[in-house]
């Protein structure tokens, strides 16, 4: 397809079809359906396409379920086809904002509560109707905002209805019992629906992350395998040349740099392969004390180079646990190296290990500058790093190993400064 030029606005088009991506302008996002035309966006449903007419109009076609408004006129596109907006404007999806949702919930509650209060008690059927209608804002709040929204709305309704119940109290009659049960049901529905909604959102988020990680893993595996052979050749030939030249040769130091950088790239390739491969655990009864001591021996050289001390504490006796020893050592080495690199000189990295019921808890505590709250989710994303020499794969690999053992990796703030990475490993059945 030809690329549109800035001078002519020919009726070319960009569209999405199946899992493929087509665009005659710059690019199209399969996830959001946004078609870019010189930084001017038209938001589309999957299967729709946009075209640019002569005169710079952006039009949307074949989108019977598309809803949107033009930023200039505010007109609702709705289900109409061939709606256009001036070039430079945006066609956006009609999505209710959080503020609008909250206002709608308040409106529903108030509009039901007012007639409920001012209707005569003799009109019993209307009060039953109003009590049933109160479930509508509770359900909407739970669906939109999860547990917090569902409970907030149900508690708000309860606060509104308690005076009504108190004023019309009749010695705990059947009507009073019904009113109390309605209040209980509002809160129960709000809590249950909110919990289910939160679980669904977490499940959807995990599915998206799994899909993204799987796609990234396939790409990383391909790149790593393509890099591995050339790096082995470069490192091997460099070492061969280095052995056959005099130590005082001016190229000797340069060859040292080549060997060092090749080793760094080989470690990066190893991390990429570790991240891309599915983990197959080989469980055996392992002593966590021994695994930690062996890991600290590996990290000792790095700590000495940075003049950082490592202190380990084992609180109580820890029973042998079914673990993949090699993977746990890999995860622990990554955590301790990160803590050493984050700590200033002459500081101490503390490793604390103890058993809590059927879980082993390992804390790796540093005295660095800490991690900002808004970055704590990002540090587990592949290739996100704040270190010049980092690959951004260390912590994602640690998290992957922890989750493969049905465990978890958490970040905790220290009382004074720095952070603690907590690795939790439950006792697995072999």
Image: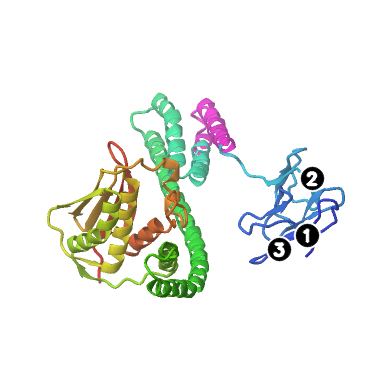
Cα gap from disc 3 to disc 2, whole angstroms: 21 Å
Disc 2 target residue: 87
- Specify the color scheme: rainbow
In front: label 1 or label 2: 1
Give the vertical position of 164 relative to 350 (above or below).
Answer: above
Residue 430 can be seen in this image: yes
Q: Which residues are magenta?
A: 99-128
Residue 220, image x and y in percent? 50, 67
Magenta stretch mostly in which secondary structure?
Answer: helix
Kindly identify which numbered label has been placed on residue 428: none
Q: Residues within 10 Å of mark 2 (few under 14, many from 20)?
A: some
Neighbours of disc 1 within 10 Å: few (<14), some (14-19), many (20+):
few
Task: Determine if the magenta segment contains residue 115.
Answer: yes
Relative depth, front residue between 147 and 241? 241
Q: Could you tell whether 197 is left or right of 31 in the image?
A: left
Screen quadrant of the N terminus: bottom right
Considering the image in quadrants, where does the C terminus appear? bottom left
For the residue labelled by badge 3, is the local secondary structure a helix, a strand or a loop?
Answer: loop
Circles 3 and 1: CB atoms closer than 8 Å? no
Q: Nearer the viewer, residue 215 or 105?
A: 215
Residue tagged by mark 1?
Answer: 3
Q: Position of residue 268 (x, y in %)?
A: 43, 63
Q: Is residue 282 magenta?
A: no
């Amino acid at each position: 397809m030809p690329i549109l030029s800035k001078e002519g606005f020919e009726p070319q088009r960009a569209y999405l079809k199946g899992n493929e991506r087509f665009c005659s302008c710059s690019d199209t996002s399969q996830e959001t359906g946004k078609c870019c035309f010189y930084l001017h966006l038209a938001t589309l449903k999957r299967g729709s396409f946009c075209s640019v007419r002569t005169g710079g109009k952006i039009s949307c076609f074949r989108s019977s379920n598309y809803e949107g408004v033009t930023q200039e006129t505010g007109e609702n596109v709705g289900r109409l086809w061939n709606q256009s907006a001036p070039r430079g404007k945006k066609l956006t999806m009609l999505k209710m904002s959080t503020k609008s949702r909250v206002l709608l919930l308040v409106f529903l509650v108030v509009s039901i509560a007012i007639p409920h209060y001012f209707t005569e008690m003799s009109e019993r059927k209307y009060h039953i109707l109003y009590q049933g209608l109160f479930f509508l804002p509770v359900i909407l709040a739970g669906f939109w905002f999860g547990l917090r929204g569902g409970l907030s709305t149900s508690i708000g309704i309860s606060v509104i209805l308690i005076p009504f119940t108190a004023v019309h109290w009749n010695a705990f009659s059947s009507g009073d019992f019904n009113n109390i049960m309605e209040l209980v049901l509002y809160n129960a529905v709000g809590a249950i629906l909110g919990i289910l909604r939160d679980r669904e959102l977490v499940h959807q988020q995990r599915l998206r992350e799994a899909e993204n990680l799987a796609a990234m893993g396939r790409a990383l595996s391909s790149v790593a395998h393509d890099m591995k052979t050339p790096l082995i050749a470069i490192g091997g030939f460099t070492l061969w040349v280095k052995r056959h030249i005099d130590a005082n040769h001016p190229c000797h130091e340069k060859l040292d740099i080549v060997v060092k950088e090749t080793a760094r790239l080989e470690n990066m390739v190893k991390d990429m392969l570790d991240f891309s491969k599915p983990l197959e655990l080989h469980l055996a009864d392992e002593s966590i004390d021994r695994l930690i001591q062996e890991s600290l021996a590996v990290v000792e050289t790095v700590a000495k180079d940075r003049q950082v001390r490592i202190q380990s504490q084992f609180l109580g006796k820890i029973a042998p646990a079914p673990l993949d020893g090699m993977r746990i050592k890999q995860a622990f080495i990554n955590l301790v190296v990160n803590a050493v690199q984050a700590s200033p000189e002459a500081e101490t990295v503390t490793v604390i290990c103890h058993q809590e019921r059927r879980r082993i808890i390992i804390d790796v505590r540093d005295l660095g500058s800490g991690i900002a709250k808004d970055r704590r989710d990002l540090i587990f994303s592949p290739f996100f790093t704040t270190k010049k020499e980092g690959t951004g794969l260390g912590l994602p690999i640690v998290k992957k190993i922890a989750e493969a053992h049905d465990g978890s990796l958490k970040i905790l703030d220290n009382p004074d400064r720095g952070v603690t990475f907590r690795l939790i490993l439950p006792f697995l059945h072999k």
